[in-house]
Amino acid sequence: MKIVAFETKVSIMRKDDPTWRFALGASPVTEGHILRIATEDGVEGFGYASTTAHMGSLTGSLQAELEYLKASVLGRDSDEIESILIGLDRAMRGAPQAKAAIDCALFDLQARRLGVPLCNLFGGKVRSRIPILRILAIKTPAEMAAQARKLVNGGYNYLKIKVHGEVAEDVARVAAIRAEVGEGVHLTIDANQSYTPKDAITALNAMAKYTIDLAEQPVPVEDFAGLALVTRSVPITIEADEGAGSLREIYRLVTERAVDAVSLKIPKLGGLRNTVAAARICEAGEIKYRLGAAVGSRLLAAHGMHMACSLRDVDYACELGEFARLLDDPFEGLEVKDGFIELPQGPGVGVRLAGAKA
Ligand SMILES: [Mg+2]
């Protein structure tokens, strides 16, 4: 069916904690764009374009990319998703966040047209719910421990500790949080590239006694050899995030066994199609993967849930519940309950514009 509408709307969501920060920055709001496409018979599809400066997109640049790519979508047959996606890559190099929104909207529209949950387009569900990991912003050890307690009391069993490359301070954060939550809670670390390889090795070996399941992107993305060195030098699972920004980068990480795990994110990989491809590359190389933080509307998290529930090897908590700390979400129909999110029911992605009929 012919695609006749391609509309974008800026989405600015306030954070419930305006001082939230991590090693690469701080902002009191989360910005993005809601993309709506529709075919001439009135079936709609929605995608979320995530503004992520550390992955190369700003609200204005993303708007310009979406506007530029519009001509590659309008007038096309909605059945020809792969062909449209090939066209996007021919029209413009890069722009993964804009392409992800279009990819997500195309698959949502197709699933709604067929009257099936979105994950049915990717082989169907292999699980129906996902444990959710929540992220602790960088603050003092005592403040982070207090926030960890609040989240554990709220039903979460997986937490991620943001750190910023200061070995002694960061180890103190981990120690305080472990002492507060006790042994039963799963802890991970995200340094967002803030360590040198040697400092990462020192810090992670010191943190290991507090039982850390996984440490994300300890060193700068450019330092591939340093990342591999850290992976070989610590007893903690090392996961690439910023360094796993494309299928080509993931292919290299996997074939050179530079990490133990990869964080898959729909916006950085350019959509659902590429997220599935990335997962298959990891499966071929026996590298773990899961869905990493999708900070933004419930719409983006819902797309992530359909991936997380249909990919074979997702066996660890995913970071799909950060919408719970954002206000003003234009979408509703997805919530975290007792630390889990249930796969949304179809048709399509399974969330709706706030105020629309269920
Ligand atoms: Mg990360």
Image (cartoon, rainbow, N blue to C red):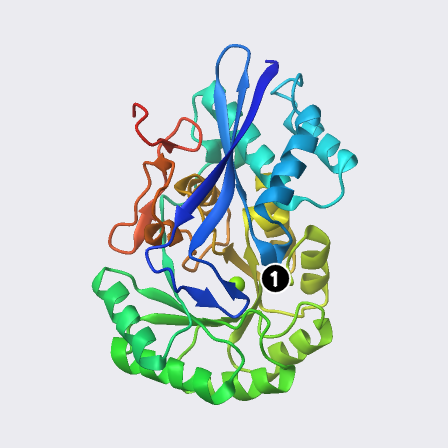
Name the residue: 46% across, 47% down: 308
Residue 276 in view, yes or no: no
Rendered position, 60 above or below 34:
below
Q: Secondary structure at mark 1?
A: loop
Q: Residue at x 29, y 56 (%)?
A: 339
Residue at mark 1: C-beta within 8 A of ligand 1: yes
Kindly identify the amino acid type of the residue bearing the numbered disc 1: Glu
Please, which residue is most extreme toward the top here?
Answer: 41
* Above or below 197: residue 71: above
Neighbour tally class for label 1: few under 14, some 14-19, many 20 plus, Cα within 10 Å:
many
Foreground residue among 95 and 188: 95
**Which residue reaches farthest right?**
90
Q: Is residue 8 left or right of residue 232?
A: left
Considering depth in this image, is 71 or 302 the residue closer to the camera? 71
How many labels sit on residues?
1
Query: Which residue sits at x=67%, y=38%?
Result: 65
Is residue 113 something that shows in the picture?
yes
Residue 10: x %, y % from top left: 50, 37
Residue 318 image-quadrant placement: bottom left
- Where in the figure is residue 355, as x and y percent of width and height? 30, 28
Residue 238 drawn at (x, y percent) = 56, 72
Where on the picture, by quarter, is residue 250? bottom right
What residue did someone put label 1 on?
242
Q: Is residue 3 left or right of residue 89?
A: left
> Which of the image's four quarters has the N terminus?
top right
